[in-house]
């Protein structure tokens, strides 16, 4: 491969942020190429040739083009994460990698559906000129509280979700959680749960996060 990895999208997208964090974690050379989301550039060529669904992110690494943030993240970690310190998939341990998979599934099917709807109502709709529906917000805040109670129990006995190590299972939580904490009045959902808040503090302290977070403008 020659040249930097190209990432198409905007850092404010939680899915793009996940990919950027993975690239930072492994120290890969990359270039973020923004798209004009307001003009729906992602729905036109040439981006549709990168992602036929018109979504972000997309990644180009030499002749390889990928879309879907989880697939991209796994590819980046497998290709560039060659040391134990950058093995965020825990590929060297069947048991540990299985736990990473478990908590990534939890994020996808329990955490994200709840938090994404809160962020959509409180951050995205106002940004595009819409009005939030507080009844919808309260419905999904209630669902998120129940999920966070499970997280609090888990994190009270483990510094990270999959075990005593930071992994992709933690990293995939960053984007939507950052939007919730920085862009809404619901940071208290984390602050009221000591173990969850300590976990979030550990994530925010990572050098990769310190580089990517300033790129996110809410």
Image: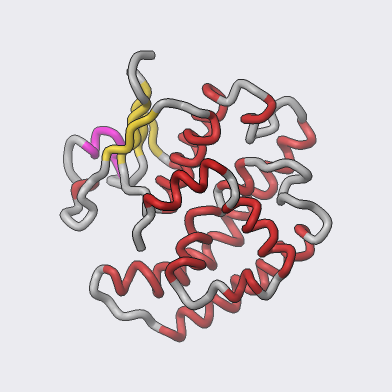
Relative depth, front residue between 217 and 162: 217
Query: Quick check: 126 above or below 65?
Result: below
Look at the image and tell me whether residue 16 can be seen: yes
Question: Left or right: 153 with respect to 197?
Answer: right
**Residue under the image location 65 percent in, 52 percent down:** 202
Q: Residue at x 42, y 41 (%)?
A: 68
Which quadrant, please, contains the C terminus? bottom left
Q: Is residue 47 left or right of residue 81?
A: left
**Was residue 140 drawn as part of the magenta stretch in this picture?**
no
Q: What stretch of residues is rendered in magenta? A: 47-53
x 34%, y 35%: residue: 7
Q: How is the image coloured?
A: secondary structure
Which residue lies at the image location 47% right of the left edge and 79% below the top edge? 137
How many marks on residues?
0
Q: Height in image: 112 above or below 187? A: above
Q: Where is residue 157 in the image (x, y as percent from the top left)?
A: 83, 56
The picture places residue 22, in percent across and down from the top left corner, at 51, 37
Residue 45 position within the rendered picture, expressed as x and y whole percent measured from the top left: 17, 38
The quadrant in which residue 148 appears is bottom right
Toward the bottom, the furthest residue is 135
What x and y, as percent, mark residue 29?
A: 41, 26
Quadrant of residue 124 in the image? bottom left
Q: Is residue 76 left or right of residue 89?
A: left
Please indicate, yes or no, whether residue 64 appears anywhere in the rendered image: no
Residue 78: which quarter of the image? Answer: top right
Does residue 42 appear to the left or right of 140 in the view shown? left
Q: Quadrant of the N terminus?
A: top left
């Amino acid at each position: 491969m020659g040249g930097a990895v190209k990432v198409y999208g905007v850092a404010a997208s939680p899915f793009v942020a996940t990919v950027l964090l993975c690239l930072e974690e492994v120290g890969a050379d990359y270039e973020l190429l923004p798209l004009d989301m307001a003009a729906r550039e992602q729905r036109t060529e040439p981006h549709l040739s990168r992602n036929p669904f018109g979504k972000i992110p997309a990644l180009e690494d030499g002749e390889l083009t990928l879309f879907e943030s989880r697939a991209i993240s796994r590819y980046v970690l497998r290709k560039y994460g060659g040391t134990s310190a950058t093995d965020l998939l825990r590929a060297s341990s069947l048991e540990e990698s299985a736990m990473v998979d478990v908590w990534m599934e939890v994020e996808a099917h329990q955490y994200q559906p709840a938090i994404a709807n809160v962020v959509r109502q409180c951050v995205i709709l106002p940004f595009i000129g819409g009005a939030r529906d507080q009844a919808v917000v309260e419905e999904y805040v209630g669902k998120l509280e129940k999920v966070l109670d499970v997280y609090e129990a888990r994190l009270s006995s483990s510094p990270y979700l999959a075990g005593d190590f930071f992994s992709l299972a933690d990293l995939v939580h960053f984007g939507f959680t950052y939007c919730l904490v920085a862009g809404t009045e619901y940071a208290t959902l984390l602050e009221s749960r000591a173990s969850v808040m300590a976990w979030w503090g550990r994530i925010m302290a990572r050098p990769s996060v310190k580089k990517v977070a300033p790129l996110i403008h809410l």
